[in-house]
Image (tube, rainbow, N blue to C red):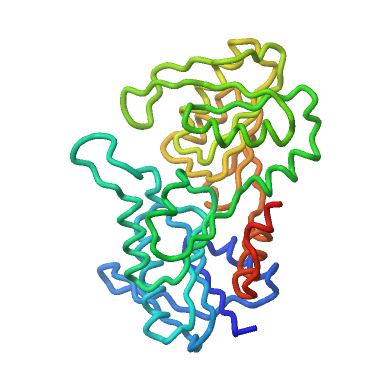
Amino acid sequence: MPEVKLFSCSASKALATDIAYHFDAPLGDTTLARFSDGEMQTILNESVRGAYTFFIQSTCQPHDNLMELLLWIDTAKRASAGYITAVIPYFGYARQDRKDKPRVPISAKLVANLLTAAGADRIMTMDLHADQVQGFFDIPVDHLRSEAIYSQYLESQDLSNVIFASPDVGGVKRARQYSVFFKRELVICDKYRTKANEVSAMTVIGNVDGADVILVDDMVDTAGTLCKAADALMDKGAKSVRAICTHPVLSGKAYDNIEKSQLSQMIVCDTIPLTRECSKIQVLSTAKLFARAIRNTVEHKSIAALFH
């Protein structure tokens, strides 16, 4: 097996440490220096010549996280790394994946171009906001699924009275995978927005009377959609409402919204570190899955086999 080098970037230090533990390899030695104006300088303190090199960094806010990742990739490329993989647990800017109105960017495509231009040979990520973002890359993309983590967790729970729900029409496919796997009913919450991050109305399609409902989503930002969906489901007679959301973006008043909501629990992954504690939020680790995917990549084994 070729030499493997794992490096942690600023936004994902805790997750990178756990991935390195499960991969049974130390994290590489790096230095991130800054000039007085904040400009970053990335320095690899060990050789990566000819090595399989992995940089672990979620491109969540602030914007510096994306720029830092690009700089690390360029650093490794100029240091003659053999194969560079950007491990991006949370792929930022994926929500803008098409022109849904005149004169707006396709930010997901721009970020894909930037990563490729910097010198990445491969992308490894989890639960893209839209599957078609994979097509924006001209390099291989390993798209890991949080279902492998959540399904194992849910199998330990009593699901006899559970109904799965999608908080919006766009997430039906994601929620349906759980309902089919666990052979449970599926309902849909249809939302109407007047502007970004603000839900004006919510309609429940399906019967939830007396049921324990689990909302399924790929990310939670302000939590406005989930809280509105929880209210609508409880108004329709649901016994309880929980949520499973891969990426805890949790911006603005998200933590307060969740604490005050009718959600009894929210289960998220550690793709983005939490900025404060919340009694309703439980975090599941993705480290073992990423470590296995990295090993399969290096050993030229199937990634899809991890989800069978």
Say which of 227 and 112 sits in front. 112
Q: Is residue 94 left or right of residue 301?
A: left
Q: Quadrant of the N terminus?
A: bottom right
Q: Position of residue 96 (x, y in %)?
A: 34, 44
* Residue at (65, 45) in percent of width and height: 147
The percent position of residue 186, horizontal first and vertical second, equals 63, 24
Report if residue 239 is visible in the image. yes
Question: Percent from the top left, x then y, of residue 153?
Answer: 74, 43
Residue 22: image quadrant is: bottom right
Q: Is residue 61 left or right of residue 243?
A: left
Which is nearer the eye, 188 or 245?
Answer: 188
Between 40 and 172, which is closer to the camera in this rendering?
172
What residue is drawn where x is 70% and y is 16%?
A: 239
Q: Is residue 248 above or below residue 201?
A: below
Q: Is residue 18 visible?
A: no
Q: Is 185 above or below relative to 89?
A: above
- Is residue 277 placed above or below 159 in the rendered structure? below
Q: Is residue 303 left or right of residue 100?
A: right
Instruction: Name the residue at 63% across, 36% down.
Output: 177
